[in-house]
Image: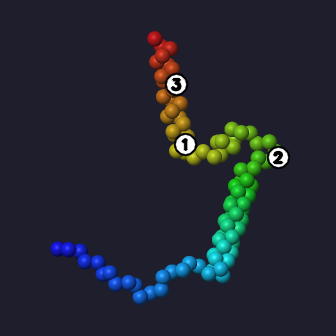
Amino acid sequence: MVNRIDVQPSKSKPWRGYSIDELRYRIAVNIARQEVEKERIIYGLGKLYEENAVPKTGMNILKRIAGALNIMDYAVLSFRLGRRLYSLYKRFRR
């Protein structure tokens, strides 16, 4: 069985590219999208800075770290610390 390709030329006109008005419109849309994204990023960074800013009362770094950890983080840290302490204990017991 032979694959037969229809060799008849297409009846539609070939694409000749964008007109100058279409190009200007696309450029304007892309510039607007970039500006929106810049504003969104700046707004997000501003919120992030406000949440993580160090208060003027001089909060202790350990309090900030303890406030950022959840129960699972405490469990993982205690497990790792326990393993290290146990290996040190075994090493010095000899």
22 above or below 43? below
**Pointers 3 and 1 in contact (C-beta within 8 Å):** no
Q: Secondary structure at mark 2?
A: loop
Instruction: Give the residue type that dot 3 points to.
Output: Leu
Residue in the image at 66% along x and 82% along y: 21
Q: Secondary structure at mark 3?
A: helix
Q: Spatial distance from mark 3 to mark 1, Cα to Cα?
A: 18 Å
Residue in the image at 54% along x and 36% along y: 77
**Pointers 2 and 3 in contact (C-beta within 8 Å):** no
Residue 25 lies in quadrant: bottom right
Residue behind mark 3: 85
**Pointers 1 and 2 in contact (C-beta within 8 Å):** no
Residue in the image at 38% along x and 84% along y: 9
Spot occupied by residue 86 in the image (x, y as percentages of width and height): 48, 24
Residue behind mark 1: 73
Q: Which mark is residue 56?
A: 2
Badge 2 density bin: few <14, some 14–19, many ≥20, Cα 10 Å: few
Q: Spatial distance from mark 2 to mark 3, Cα to Cα?
A: 37 Å
Q: Earlier in the sequence, mark 1 or mark 2?
A: 2
Residue in the image at 71% along x and 39% along y: 61
As drawn, which residue projects farthest toward the bottom?
11
Q: Quadrant of the N terminus?
A: bottom left
Q: Spatial distance from mark 1 to mark 2, Cα to Cα?
A: 28 Å
51 above or below 43? above
76 above or below 53? above
Instruction: Give the residue type that dot 1 points to.
Output: Asp
Residue 74 lies in quadrant: top right
Q: Secondary structure at mark 1?
A: helix
Spot occupied by residue 41 in the image (x, y as percentages of width and height): 68, 61
